[in-house]
Image (cartoon, grey):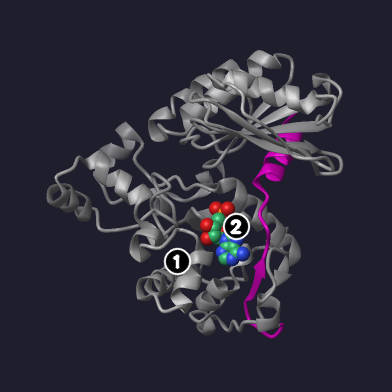
Amino acid sequence: MNVFVVNCGSSSLKYQLINSDTEEVIAKGLCERIGIDGKLTHTPAGKDKYVAEVPMPDHKSAVSYVLDALTDSEHGVIKELSEIGAVGHRIVHGGEKFAASVVITDEVITAIEECNDLAPLHNPANLIGISACRALMPEVPMVAVFDTAFHQTMPEKAYMYGLPYEYYENYKVRKYGFHGTSHSFVSKRLLDIIGKTDTPSKVIICHLGNGSSITAVKDGRSVDTSMGFTPLDGLIMGTRSGSLDPAVVQFLAGKLNVSLDEVINILNKKSGVEGISGVSSDFRDLYAASVSGNARAKVALEMFAYRVAQYIGSYVASMNGVDAIAFTAGIGENNSEMRAMIFEYLGYLGITLDKEANAKRGEELMISTPDSRVKVYVIPTNEELAIARETLALI
Ligand code: AMP
């Protein structure tokens, strides 16, 4: 069966068509500038890329162009829409309502709407994607896969904030965590590799990309994670500050004479390693700048590695041990230099870096030496495949 995986943003739509039997990507692509003008980039497997600048006044027209591209006689990959057996939608926030993926019904849509407050930029866009697909493929079963669901197993002591309890009761202010699809996918694979699928286990997953988070996974379940009420919390990221003293927000609003919204915007979009270095949010640029003597790029990289190491240490403490650690996502999979910098802090766990293995990038491999007490792996993440698997399992 072919599963259509949709990741809908406010002005963009990413998609993949995956053959669930072979798990091959038959086509993938991106609609950009929806509601502004519109651009479709469609990449069918084994054929030339197709790019079209076409008017996309709304998401329904974007989905319609994608479905046309998928069934087109030249750059298409299927003959007719009936060859799409199911649709899997990535949904950012499921609040406390969703601890697992679900088949989409009218009730589910209402429940997702009720979480809009918690992810005002993302959930409404995700819902638009659902309604656009439902309008064009009314008979096709659809599944919602939530970024937050995997973390719903966190115990209260991990997800509660030190705030008056009624703010949790009244407004659901608590830690939710994100990147759940990736943490779930990579932790399952890691448990497979170390042969602990059915036995007690303690692993730490480091999803290090433009957005980064670390999760402690005990017996296959998330027990703590570095992102919080929003994806702004935790590690220093490409342009996000990560955790800081909340008093800084009010202080900066006063000094800069801007609103709280504007400060949060600065923390999301102008901070992180980009804000620190003044160079870039991309670690390749940062590394190049650091090597050529840029002191701020160097400190940005050091800060990133330091905070990753701190989270690893705190999760070793939370779980009272660790069996294995995995690195994933853009930086985790590709950035040997950053992995080496993080390893500098892990000696106390009996971990030594296998320099030769670590020099490789983008493939599944063990990067700790065979005699390391705790094994460390690189495991490429694949959120689209994870969504396709979840979708298939539910329908
Ligand atoms: P993601 O958000 O998972 O797509 O990760 C994107 C980030 O991964 C980029 O901004 C880079 O910082 C980093 N990255 C990707 N490829 C490389 C590479 N070859 N070397 C170093 N960093 C990389």
Residue 239 locus on image (x, y percent): 40, 54
Q: Nearer the viewer, residue 264 or 298?
A: 298
- Cβ of mark 2 under 8 A from ligand 1: yes
Residue 149 image label: none
Q: Is residue 97 left or right of residue 366?
A: left
Residue annotated with mark 1: 311
Q: Are marks 2 and 1 in contact (CB under 8 Å)?
A: no
Which type of secondary structure does the marked residue at label 2 adopt? helix
Picture quadrant where residue 23 is located:
top right
Q: Of callouts 2 and 1, which one flags the residue occurring earlier in the amino acid sequence? A: 1
Residue 267 in magenta stretch: no
Residue 131 locus on image (x, y percent): 58, 18
Q: Is residue 378 left or right of residue 23?
A: left
191 to 110, vertically: above or below? below
Q: Residue at x 16, y 49 (%)?
A: 256
Distance of mark 2 from mark 1, alpha carbons?
A: 17 Å
Q: Is residue 136 left or right of residue 217?
A: right
Badge 2: few (under 14), some or many (20 or more) residues near its Cα, within 10 Å? Answer: many
- Locate the N terminus by quadrant: top right
294 to 278, vertically: above or below? below
Residue 75 locus on image (x, y percent): 80, 31
293 to 87, vertically: above or below? below
The magenta segment is 370-395
Amino acid at dot 1: Tyr
- Locate the C terminus by quadrant: top right
Badge 1: few (under 14), some or many (20 or more) residues near its Cα, within 10 Å? Answer: many
Residue annotated with mark 2: 329
Picture quadrant where residue 62 is located:
top right
Q: Nearer the viewer, residue 204 or 153?
A: 204
Q: Quadrant of ligand 1?
A: bottom right
